[in-house]
Image (cartoon, coloured by chain):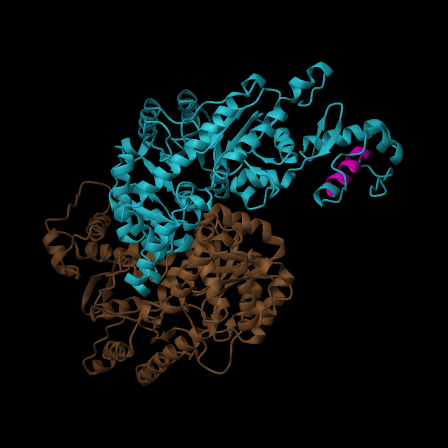
Chain colours: A cyan, B brown
């Protein structure tokens, strides 16, 4: 412990000095062991009172640098504080991008992104080459700011066919993926200090974008049938939000879908109180039951809903093409925001995607990925049902790419995340999706976008091993999760 | 004039009522004639005093709805007020996109964007197909947030080879075009109310992005050798800017390039006063003389310069790939901003552009477009030199895609813009590039990105016809531009 510099002559309490020392060492990744020295040993070697060390460790824990396991000791959080706050403003795909450490050998229950074997490469290659032959240089001019006009037409048709939603092509703006839709809408609607509502928990990538515009963000609880309308009403009266951001089908992370009544009530409220609803849709297409889901936009007779579509999870994320619908009142403002953002999205890829839709490839593609994912969903749910004896539960979404697993109340999802990581399983701790840090979260998200059927079985085995531990150890009075 | 509703019984002065009436009619495009009724006629038909009409017209002129030509009358601005303010926040390419009305039959001296015949389609098609064969689905995964790693390497090499600039690949972030670089930097550095400096005049698309973050924008005069260092110093002491936004080579719209001394002084100032320099580079490659120009970044030993590269004007705008360099101190923040903006730029196009650079196509391409544009430049300058007798002048940039033409002091560039438009010539009025509206601007920008050699000759003939008019009409005492 020659690394510590404590000065007994200054005004700074020793425990604060010790805390600062540890903080720096942890931040700079200079400690060899994940386990901190025992309280007695450290107190002895530094010549200080035990209480000094206990106080320092408590402060470290409060600030999120370490966690303690009763009867075992104090450990550095594998998920560094910096990464946690990053994640809250980021996206789970950061994990895949290596910002949240996922060992390459881990089984990836963290990502919703599809794997390349599900990409319709042959068909897309065909349209890419066809565009080159047909349009040559025209494909590489600045496209119109609003997007390649024929693609806007194809999208309008797509909305009608698949979502029973009528939107003129003039009201469609092509974006560089769904995330850009969020960014552009934020630029249009959020001034610093403006109040906006989100479902709580929600997509962390959206929170990052809203925060970057200085929004005051209020989380409204979401339950099995949609946002909590009663809570929403009381918050509306208090805060008068600019907009409400929601995901109506297979919400992330909860996987909940809105029923018709919730949608209708929401729409009427938005009309009455004059706020927009931003409906972010990325999974509506992936229904495994006969009950086809529709977006809120399909019943929007007031032009109050801005519909954002991302194709990243159901097509190919690297194409970076999505769209938003434009309310008449905001048309000009949104176009302006798109222009200051990146002028326009790649015309070449827009033309290719247009051809892809026109030549009718979409339906086959969706049927194919539905078949693959519903198999994975079945494996996942069958496995998880067997874990109910350990006090875990979840609502069956019957679609989408994730399960939102509720753990027994006394379990912190960050601890489970760490234990899973140690055992080669990557999951997402529910905590990162909540707006309010102080909300205790005993949920984890398990996604099956990236994993093989074999990995599902093996991953669930690892998970079972971890969550069953308190039960196995009951006789020895071992209480690991506190 | 049955369209006007004046109410003599209210408190609102009649001239304000008349102003409001006209304003609405102009905004709704309901007036058939561009010329407003003569003062006497309108006063008679409305039964009001001449002064009422004069006051209303003056207010309309002050607000930008009309302009008057002495001895001729008052005219509605062809460039609607809405469009002007749009343009100030937009980009000249809006013209091409049809937002600023350019007749399709016009000769386009307004755009710097290249035409498809200059695109290296064959070579790019080859690499696009090669990537599909080589990478298949991998090309359509989410790419790394920072960009496709091999492309970052190619860019690092590119910077060394072409701009004598050393930047490690780890310090390179691939963006969806240069405009996105501006947006991401704004998100990272600008909080509402922060002060930033720009050259005055400057690129209107940058102003739009900075304004959208709530920046307080101060324009610093730019002269032939670069930004006015003396003015800059005094402003720095007063305002302490977050950053200074500049274009060192062939600045837009002035076409001026910084000399070495200006660059060195600027760098030292940025170090001394701790502000970043955002160097936006879009034309450095297009030098028509033997004197190769280098960016400021090439001498940046303090890590104070963020270099933004756009390939839109020198390659193909529709590829939407550019990059920025990341100062160590801002690395994390900028990556985070990129993520909330659009997660990542298209991996497929990044891979193709990487191959394009690796296979050595770049040099030939640049030589080819240089040859084409230097010919156009020669035609343009030879033609303009002949117009010096009418009091116009300009600094020869010896590169780039525009001429910044100074008109005699008493000529308003908006009037010239309108006259040119009427005669089938699209130019850009200098006014739209200035930060401060009140600055009177007798400059126009003439670009030769989009026009054939024949159109240059014809366009200059039209321009000569317009600017020589005061001289031809001298004997009849006609003073058209006041």
In the image, residue A294 sits, relative to residue B190, either above or below, namely above
Farthest residue to the top: give it: A475
Residue A161 located left or right of residue A48: left
Residue A284 located left or right of residue A221: left
Instruction: Where is residue A254? Give x, y as percent.
Output: 47, 28
In the image, residue A324 sits, relative to residue A463, either above or below, namely below
In the rendered image, which quarter is residue A58 located in?
top right
Foreground: A295 or A318?
A: A318
Q: Which span is picked out in magenta?
A: A13-24
Instruction: Where is residue A89? Give x, y as percent.
Output: 53, 40
Residue A52 located left or right of residue B130: right
In the image, residue B238 sits, relative to residue A232, either above or below, namely below
Q: Tell me the residue at 16%/46% (across/down).
A: B6
Tell me the chief SS of the magenta region.
Answer: helix
Instruction: Where is residue A326? Give x, y as percent.
Output: 31, 43
Does residue B361 show up magenta in the picture?
no
Residue A26 located left or right of residue B354: right
Q: Tell me the residue at 24%/41% (across/down).
A: B11
Residue B439 in sight here: no
Residue B105 in sight here: yes
Q: Tell me the residue at 54%/71% (across/down).
A: B163
Instruction: Where is residue B292? Give x, y as percent.
Output: 51, 78
Foreground: B309 or A68?
A: A68
């Amino acid at each position: 412990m020659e690394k510590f510099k404590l000065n007994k002559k200054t005004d700074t309490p020793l425990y604060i000095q010790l805390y600062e020392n540890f903080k720096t060492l942890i931040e700079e990744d200079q400690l060899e062991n994940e386990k901190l020295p025992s309280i007695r040993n450290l107190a002895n070697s530094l010549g200080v009172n035990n209480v000094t060390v206990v106080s320092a460790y408590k402060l470290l824990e409060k600030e999120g640098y370490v966690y303690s396991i009763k009867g075992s000791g104090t450990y550095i959080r594998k998920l560094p504080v910096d990464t946690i706050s990053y994640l809250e403003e980021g996206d789970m795909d950061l994990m895949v991008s290596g910002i949240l450490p996922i060992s390459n050998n881990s089984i990836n229950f963290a990502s919703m992104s599809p794997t390349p074997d599900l990409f319709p490469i042959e068909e897309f290659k065909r349209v890419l080459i066809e565009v080159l032959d047909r349009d040559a240089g025209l494909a590489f001019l600045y496209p119109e700011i609003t997007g390649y006009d024929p693609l806007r037409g194809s999208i309008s048709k797509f909305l009608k066919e698949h979502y029973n939603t009528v939107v003129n092509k003039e009201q469609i703006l092509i974006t560089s993926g769904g995330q850009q839709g969020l960014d552009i809408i934020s630029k249009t609607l959020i001034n610093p200090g403006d109040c906006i509502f989100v479902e709580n928990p929600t997509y962390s990538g959206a929170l990052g974008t809203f925060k970057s515009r200085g929004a005051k963000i209020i989380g409204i609880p979401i339950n099995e049938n949609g946002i909590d309308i009663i809570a929403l009403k009381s918050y509306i009266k208090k805060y008068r939000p600019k907009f409400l951001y929601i995901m109506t089908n297979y919400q992330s992370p909860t996987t909940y879908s809105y029923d018709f009544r919730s949608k209708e009530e929401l729409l009427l409220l938005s009309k009455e109180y004059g706020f927009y609803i931003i409906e972010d849709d990325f999974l509506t297409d992936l229904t495994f039951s006969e009950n086809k889901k529709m977006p809120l936009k399909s019943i929007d007779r007031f032009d109050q809903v801005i519909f954002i579509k991302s194709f990243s999870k159901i097509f190919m994320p690297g194409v970076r093409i999505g769209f938003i619908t434009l309310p008449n009142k905001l048309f000009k403002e949104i176009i302006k925001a798109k222009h200051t953002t990146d002028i326009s999205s790649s015309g070449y890829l827009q033309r290719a995607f247009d051809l892809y839709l026109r030549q009718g490839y979409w339906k086959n593609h969706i049927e194919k990925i539905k078949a693959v994912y519903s198999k994975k969903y079945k494996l996942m749910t069958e496995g998880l049902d067997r874990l109910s004896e350990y006090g875990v539960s979840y609502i069956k979404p019957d679609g989408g790419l994730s399960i939102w697993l509720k753990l027994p109340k006394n379990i912190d999802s960050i601890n489970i995340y760490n234990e899973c990581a140690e055992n080669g399983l990557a999951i997402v701790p529910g905590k990162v999706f909540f707006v309010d840090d102080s909300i205790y979260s005993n949920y984890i998200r398990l996604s099956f976008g990236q994993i093989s059927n074999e990995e599902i079985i093996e991953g669930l085995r690892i998970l079972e091993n971890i969550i069953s531990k308190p039960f196995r150890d009951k006789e020895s009075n071992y209480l690991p999760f506190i």
